[in-house]
Amino acid sequence: MRITSQNLIEFWAVATRPLTENGLGFSVDRAMEELRVLKQLFILLPDAPLQSEWERLVTTYRVSGKSCHDARLVAAMMVHGTMSILTFNIQDFTRYAGIIVLDPRLIA
């Protein structure tokens, strides 16, 4: 399984956000340790030139607002030939043709 730097950044944001704000409330040290573990468990895809693919996706699918972050993940998938994504946010990715969206709650 593969991840991008964006996955790590989004994890950091949630991990270090206070519990009262729907985060995990981790300290910086704990979050860094979790990042280290994630980078050992998953292949970290390099930040290749994704801009043109991202622009194609946001234009083609008329993406606006916060959904542009999801489009960047899909752009990374397309550039690196990864056609499936594991996410709790199934509805955020169903608009994109050619990818498989997997719900972790349904993976045994």
Image (spheres, rainbow, N blue to C red):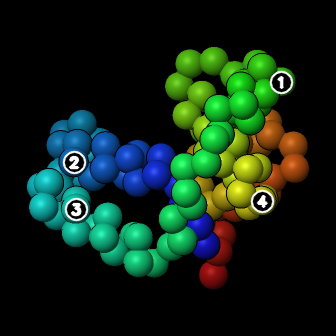
Q: Earlier in the sequence, mark 3 or mark 1?
A: 3
Q: Earlier in the sequence, mark 3 or mark 2?
A: 2
Circle 4 SS class: loop
The Cα atoms of the two marked residues, 3 and 2, are separated by: 10 Å
**Measuring 22% from the left and 69% from the top, which residue is drawn there?**
33
Residue 107's label in the rendered image is none
Q: Are marks 3 and 2 in contact (CB under 8 Å)?
A: no
Instruction: Give amino acid for label 1.
Output: Thr
Query: What residue did someone put label 3 on?
Result: 32
* Camera-nearest label, 4 or 1: 4
Residue 60's label in the rendered image is 1
Q: Position of residue 24 (x, y in %)?
A: 25, 53
* Camera-nearest label, 4 or 2: 4
Q: Position of residue 58 (x, y in %)?
A: 72, 24
Q: Are marks 4 and 1 in contact (CB under 8 Å)?
A: no
Circle 3 SS class: helix
Instruction: Give amino acid for label 3.
Output: Met
The Cα atoms of the two marked residues, 4 and 1, are separated by: 19 Å
**Measuring 65% from the left and 69% from the top, which residue is drawn there?**
106
Residue 51 visible in the snapshot: yes
**Measuring 76% from the left and 49% from the top, which residue is drawn there?**
78
Circle 1 SS class: helix
Near-viewer residue (32 or 108) = 32
| Occupied quadrant, residue 101 | bottom right
**Measuring 78% from the left and 27% from the top, which residue is drawn there?**
56
Q: Which residue lies most toward the right here?
A: 98
The local crowd at label 3, few if under 14, some if 14 to 19, many if 20 or more residues have their Cα within 10 Å, is some
Query: What residue did someone put label 2 on?
Result: 16
Q: Earlier in the sequence, mark 4 or mark 2?
A: 2
Circle 2 SS class: helix
Query: What residue did someone put label 4 on?
Result: 81
Near-viewer residue (89 or 43) = 43
